Image (cartoon, coloured by chain):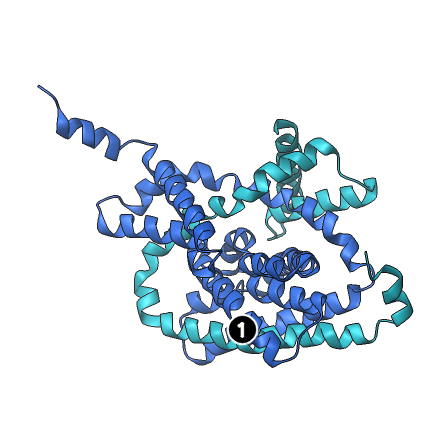
Amino acid sequence: MLYGLIVFISYLLIGEFISALLAWPVPGSVLGMLLLFLTLVIRGGVSDSVKQSSQQLLPYLPLFIVPASVGIVNYMDLIQAEGHIILSAMLVSLVLGIPVCGWLAQKAMAKVPTAEKDKTGGA
Amino acid sequence: MLHWNDALNAVWHSPYLGLFLTILSFQLGLWLFRMSAQKPFLHPVMVSVTSVCAVVLITDLSFERYMESAHMISQFLGPVIVALAIPLYENLKALRQYWLPFLLSNVLGGAFTILVAVGMVYGLGASEMSVNSMWTKSITTAFALEVAPQIGGMASVAAAIIMFTGIFGALMAPALFRLCNIHQAPAQGCALGVCAHAVGTAKALEFGGEQGAFAALSMSFMGILCAFSLPFLLGI
């Protein structure tokens, strides 16, 4: 658990370092995630201890976003005034967006050669 | 002689109270979510945030005092975002032959759904704060909490938008799939991941493993894409 946490925080700090160095407005955590991902691709695998830590930590991700989300109590006026606009925009973008995203993927899939599909179809 | 008032005060002003409320309400949310066979409206985050908000609004516990205690939970957000690299890497093999449909759905479909939402709030005359907070609607909350402030949005407003988008997306997706004849697993997964992020990914896993993998990939990819593009496009 601790070993993985050290790896994650190291990449987080590297991400923050690079982001500050280049004066990029990109969050250090996201940059760190991308760097860890690239490391895994180059290494061609995940070590067991790092994988185990991620499996222990990731189920609690939803818990970690709760405190910041509670900050909405400071914006009750905004919700009261514009909640209906936000809600309708959200619903319209879903009703249009879900079919469009699915349709784009499905159209492009039809172009993938069948032979290739069969090769790995069961995998 | 027992000091009831002092004792209750000590608990109410304890630096552990916010931490306790957060974990307690989240555990309650987990129970409700499991008992209800994972109804999206009883998502643990929804239950937890609503209960803590109620306590903050009703009692004299201010948000600032709550956050002083609960912020130690927030600090895990950074390391856990980095840890998302592992499932991203492990799901990668699902992309082998479907990388093009995946990219099209994420980049074009993602841009479409974001622009529709942002265009609508802007066109209906919402404040700059709402418009800016809408840009992050298609990325998972963990990412949005970090991206929203970079583009003049409000983290908590963005989080609320994302929570409801995820819930409504997961609720509406099955009907929309049937209506629009979207039956291929990768297409369903991409649509759920792009439009309904984390809640959508949970829903996708109910459809099947392949849907789940594509949803998880889409969720992470959209997060990375938006985190790298939005601050440069809209940066303040």
In the depicted view, which residue is nearer to us: B210 or B129? B210
- Which colour represents chain A? cyan
Place residue B107 in its image quadrant.
bottom right
Secondary element type, mark 1: helix
Number of marks in picture:
1
Residue at image position (40%, 75%) is A85
Q: Colour of chain B?
A: blue
Q: Position of residue B42 (x, y in %)?
A: 42, 56
Q: Is residue B125 above or below residue B225?
A: below
Q: Which chain does tag 1 point to?
A: A
Which amino acid, by three-letter code, is at mark 1? Leu
Say whether residue B145 is left or right of residue B8. right
User: Above or below — where is B6 with respect to B203?
Assistant: above
Residue marked by disc 1: A94
Crowding near pointer 1: few (<14 within 10 Å), some, many (20+)?
A: many
Q: Residue B65 in the image: x percent, y percent? A: 31, 40
Q: Quadrant of the C terminus of chain A?
A: bottom right
| x, y percent for residue A29 | 60, 45
Front residue of B204/B216: it is: B204
* Residue A20 seen from this side: no
Percent position of residue A106, x then y: 73, 74
Task: State the residue at coordinates (64%, 46%).
Answer: B84
* Residue beneath the point at 60% across and 62% down: B230
